[in-house]
């Protein structure tokens, strides 16, 4: 039975006789293949290969929806040619994050008169250019844009304001305190706000844009979806209160989506928040998405919302407090939980996860797709009873695609007490050199692996670790994104505040999570995105090598504070692992004492598809020639962000060398090299492209943070 499948053997004659050409594929298969090719390459390159491909490349499924997001090699000239050729066919254009394209390129969009959806987030859009754009796009119903410094709504033409009045969906990123274009959008059904005003901001004329008057107050007559995501800072919280104040003037009949995400401590609950809840309850039906800040949500409010049904997206991160356990409220609400697709139960570092409660939840939510349990603790105190382990409960989620767990959740049992003798202690006590060695220090429990004679993990320990992880691995075979973050971890990379100068202590249970657990995770064959942070039990890093060998399609990897922070013992294993990451597109590494030397960059150069790289090392160093050689060798890298302990002169020299030598061939190139502890780092961060800053440079959990399931 074991040898029923044998490898096929083909002779050269049979191969030549059965050769397959492009004409042998059906149009459906070819269209599916062509859908993975960037739009500008498809139209300007592939369509000119042959007559058949020319016809297929004109199929509406390929040219009606153009996506330029993350197409970093698209130049202004290529985008202009693309839009001119497809001007009469394009219905949807996603050009978000194309910060490198010139404003004149946006003028070509005016030719696409059939556009219904347009996303130009990341572009600098002036009122005059926006007026010309809106004046020609009479079918536009969905718009996403940035509102930057100097934007004045009064400069918008009457045609532009008329076009805004027809919009049903608006997403605007505010880089300056302003209502943006909202006051002109009287027919909005969906409003998404991203408040990104930097602390210390100052613009003399901006207060004129925030005067509360009949013409400047946002109107939400027909609103069904409202979301607001804030960057840190008091100015963003004050700006949000102005937007929410408009609800007191006109309350929508029923909101079906309410998402307000606010980092850090939230201000006292405004009166308008009660009106928002009233809008939800007045709908009389289940809401699609729900999230409120910590200080604005209590058990009674959540029960009232759940009384009409469970939403598809529910985010109650950092909301637990005395007398309010979100999981208990959710399980006790008495509503059907099967509609739930995304659930965020991220804690505040002191909450304990109830494995039985999670088991009840997973059995009630068989279609849960995104689940976040980070910043909590799970301590399995009975290693001999694996049935009650958290991994066993998570194994019921067969459709799970992304998961965030605290590092201690993969610990099989309690940490080894510091006064309990282990194998090394026993051997040293029998040594003839007894009395000449230093006594063992008593402090944070150290990771105590069971080692064989070669220094590798014993087979019985590997089997035990695999046994309690098996329900998770077998039960969630299609897991695409995994975050394993030690509770209490804080990145040294700041947003606007000074950099962290001291690393937080790790949970003692996380010392039991090391190379064996990482090796077992290598059986998640479909894993694409992986985050490992604050894992002091990773000693040699051999498990990391086995992990990437198993997860061959890994595309995004983020590592932070693994193993010993000062000695970085896993560096050789990391370099070996990088050589096997042939599909890696994004790599972020944060380690307080890391040397970015020639050996590291040589290993990183094996990642031929790498596009974005970020290194955060408070006391780290780098070698200038090695960094330059790496960037010259890897032609697809367009983001090189490095924050180390190097001098300001050394950092600026490397940055200038890379920009001068590579900007001409890489239009989207973003290079930032700066000392992490420098006092002007905040100003440097403000100048970064927001897409890179938010997606990779800043460390944060991303699982179940956005309602992407809707």
Image (cartoon, rainbow, N blue to C red):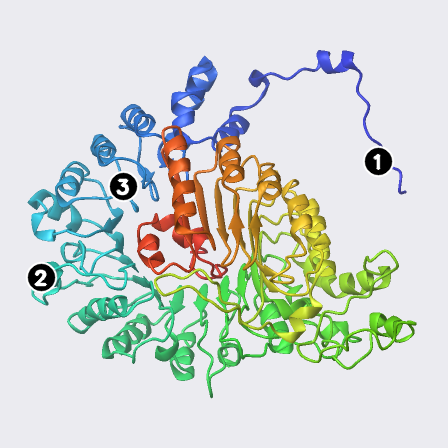
Residue drawn at x 85%, y 59% as measured from the top left? 459
- Looking at the image, residue 385 sits to the left or right of residue 525; the answer is right
Of the numbered discs in the image, which one, if any, rests on residue 208? 2
Residue occupying the point 17% across, 42% down? 130
Residue under the image location 60 percent in, 38 percent down: 602
- Residue under label 1, please give it: 5
Residue in the foreground of this view, choosing between 460 and 481: 460
Question: Badge 1: few (under 14), some or many (20 or more) residues near its Cα, within 10 Å?
Answer: few
Outermost residue to the front: 436
Q: How many residues crowd around disc 3 within 10 Å: few (fewer than 14), some, or many (20 or more)?
A: some
Q: Is residue 162 above or below residue 501?
A: above
Viewer-proximal residue, 53 or 605? 605
Q: Secondary structure at mark 1?
A: loop
Is residue 658 depicted above or below 291 in this figure? above
Sequence-earlier tag: 3 or 1: 1
Q: CA distance from mark 2 to mark 1?
A: 75 Å
Query: Of the residues under marks 2 and 1, which one precedes in the sequence?
Result: 1
Q: In the rendered image of this protein, does residue 660 appear above or below residue 648? A: above
- Residue corresponding to mark 3: 116
Measure the alpha-carbon separation of dots 2 and 3. 32 Å
Q: Position of residue 491 (x, y in %)?
A: 48, 63
Which of the pair 47/665 is nearer the observer?
665
The quarter holding residue 397 reads: bottom right
CB under 8 Å between callouts 2 and 3? Answer: no
Q: Residue most toward the bottom?
A: 323
Residue 638 drawn at (x, y percent): 43, 38
């Amino acid at each position: 039975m074991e040898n029923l499948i044998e490898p096929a053997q083909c002779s050269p004659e049979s191969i030549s006789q059965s050769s397959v050409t492009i004409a042998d594929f059906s149009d459906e298969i070819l269209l599916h293949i062509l859908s993975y090719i960037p739009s500008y390459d498809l139209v300007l390159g592939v369509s000119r290969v042959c007559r058949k491909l020319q016809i297929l490349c004109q199929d509406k499924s390929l040219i009606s929806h153009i996506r330029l997001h993350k197409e970093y090699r698209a130049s202004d000239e290529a985008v202009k040619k693309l839009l001119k050729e497809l001007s009469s066919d394009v219905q949807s254009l996603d050009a978000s994050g194309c910060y490198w394209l010139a404003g004149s390129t946006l003028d070509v969009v005016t030719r696409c008169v059939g556009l219904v959806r347009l996303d130009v987030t990341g572009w600098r859009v002036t009122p005059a250019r926006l007026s010309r754009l809106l004046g020609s796009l009479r079918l536009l119903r969905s718009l996403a844009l940035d509102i930057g410094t100097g934007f004045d709504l009064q400069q918008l033409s009457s045609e532009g304001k008329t076009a805004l009045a027809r919009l049903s969906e608006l997403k605007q990123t505010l880089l300056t305190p302003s209502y943006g274009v909202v006051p002109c959008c009287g027919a909005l059904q969906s409003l998404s706000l991203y408040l990104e005003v930097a602390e210390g901001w100052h613009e003399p004329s901006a207060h004129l844009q925030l005067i509360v008057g009949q013409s400047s107050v946002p109107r939400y007559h027909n609103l069904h979806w409202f979301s607001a995501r804030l960057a840190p800072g008091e100015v963003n919280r004050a700006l949000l209160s102005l937007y929410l104040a408009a609800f007191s003037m006109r309350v929508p009949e029923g909101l079906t989506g309410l998402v307000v995400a606010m980092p850090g401590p939230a201000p006292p609950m405004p009166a308008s928040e009660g009106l928002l809840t009233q809008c939800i309850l007045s709908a009389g039906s289940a809401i699609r998405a729900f999230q409120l800040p910590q200080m604005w949500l209590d058990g009674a409010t959540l029960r009232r919302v759940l009384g009409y049904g469970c939403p598809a997206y529910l985010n109650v991160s950092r909301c637990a407090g005395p007398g309010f356990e979100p999981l208990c409220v959710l399980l006790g609400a008495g509503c059907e939980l099967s509609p739930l697709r995304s659930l965020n139960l991220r804690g505040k570092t002191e909450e304990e996860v109830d494995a039985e409660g999670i088991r009840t939840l997973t059995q009630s939510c068989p279609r849960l797709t995104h689940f976040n349990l980070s910043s909590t603790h799970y301590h399995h105190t009975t290693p001999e009873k694996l049935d009650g382990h958290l991994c066993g409960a998570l194994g019921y989620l067969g459709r799970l695609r992304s998961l965030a767990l605290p590092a201690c959740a993969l610990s099989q049992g309690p940490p080894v007490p510091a006064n309990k003798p282990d194998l090394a202690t026993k051997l040293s006590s029998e040594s003839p050199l007894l009395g000449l060695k230093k006594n063992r220090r008593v402090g944070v429990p150290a990771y105590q692996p069971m080692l064989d004679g070669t220094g590798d993990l014993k087979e019985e320990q590997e089997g035990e670790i695999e046994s309690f992880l098996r329900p998770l691995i077998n039960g969630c075979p299609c897991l695409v994104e995994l975050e394993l973050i030690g509770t209490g971890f804080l990145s040294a990379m700041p947003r606007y505040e000074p950099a962290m100068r001291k690393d937080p202590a790790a949970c003692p249970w996380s010392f039991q999570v090391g190379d064996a657990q990482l090796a077992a995770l290598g059986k998640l064959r479909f894993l694409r995105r992986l985050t490992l942070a604050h894992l002091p039990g990773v000693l040699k890093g051999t498990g990391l090598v086995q992990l990437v060998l198993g997860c061959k399609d890994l595309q995004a990897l983020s590592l932070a504070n693994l193993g010993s922070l000062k000695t970085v013992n896993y560096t050789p294993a990391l370099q070996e692992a990088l050589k096997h990451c042939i599909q890696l597109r994004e790599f972020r590494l944060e380690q307080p004492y890391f040397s970015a030397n020639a050996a590291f960059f040589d290993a990183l150069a094996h990642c031929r598809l790498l596009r974005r790289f970020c290194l955060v090392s408070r006391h780290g160093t780098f070698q200038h020639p090695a960094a330059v050689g790496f960037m010259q060798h890897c032609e697809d890298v367009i983001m090189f962000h490095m924050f180390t302990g190097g001098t300001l002169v050394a950092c600026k020299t490397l940055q200038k060398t890379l920009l001068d030598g590579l900007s001409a061939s890489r239009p989207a190139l973003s290079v930032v090299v700066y000392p992490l502890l420098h006092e002007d780092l905040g100003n440097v961060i403000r100048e970064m492209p927001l897409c890179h800053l938010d997606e990779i440079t800043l460390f944060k959990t991303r699982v179940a943070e956005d309602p992407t399931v809707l």
